[in-house]
Image (cartoon, rainbow, N blue to C red):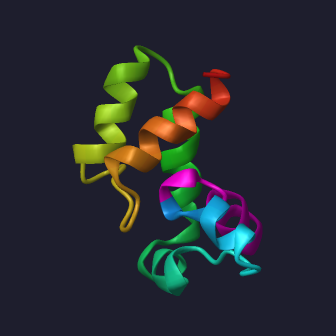
Amino acid sequence: MADVTSNLSLLHVYGVPRDIRHGKVPSVWHGGFKYENEFDDVKSGIKHLLYGEGDTIKRMADLIYDKSYKLHQFSQSNVQELVGWINNE
């Protein structure tokens, strides 16, 4: 889980550029994300979002609203930014 949370902590939504400029090492949501989500749920949700079948917009909505995919402390902005990373946007 440490690798996943470390990489997700680089999302700009969490203010990482600001933190790095001020010499802080980014942490993922002060630990809440990794304690409030099971690792298998994180893997399943992110995999569905980025590589699942069907429409990207539908998969984004799944991760934001569907209880079977939704992750604690992972908002709409996180979902949108992560999809942008994968699609080079």
Number of dots carrying numbers: 0
Q: Is residue 6 above or below residue 84?
A: below
Relative image position of residue 6 (x, y in whole percent): 72, 68
Residue 77 higher or lower than 54, as above or below = below
Please state if 25 lies on the left or on the right of 54 as rendered.
right
Residue sitting at x 39%, y 60%: 71
Is residue 74 visible in the rendered structure shown here?
Answer: yes
Dividing the picture into quadrants, the one containing residue 59 is top left
Position of 2 with respect to 13 (left or right) is right
Q: Which residues are magenta?
A: 1-13
Question: Where does the N terminus fall, quadrant-wise?
Answer: bottom right
Q: Position of residue 64 (x, y in %)?
A: 29, 45
Horizontal relation, residue 5 to residue 35: left or right: right
- In the image, 10 versus 61, the foreground residue is 10
Residue at the location (56% across, 62% down)? 40
Residue 81: image location, x then y, percent? 51, 39
Q: Residue at x 66, y 58 (%)?
A: 10
- When the figure is inspected, residue 75 is found, relative to residue 9, above or below; the finding is above
Q: Could you tell me residue 26's position as x and y percent?
A: 67, 74
Between residue 37 and residue 40, name the one nearer to us.
37
The quadrant of the picture occupied by the C terminus is: top right
Is residue 18 in the magenta section? no
| Residue at the farthest top position | 55
Q: Quadrant of residue 84?
A: top right
Residue 2 within the segment the image draws in magenta: yes
Asked whether the viewer can see residue 48, the reply is: no
Nearest to the observer: residue 85 or residue 71: 85
Main secondary structure along the magenta-highlighted residues = helix
Question: Which residue corresponds to the image point at 36% horizontal and 67% vertical from the top-left?
Answer: 72
| Viewer-nearest residue: 56 or 7 | 7
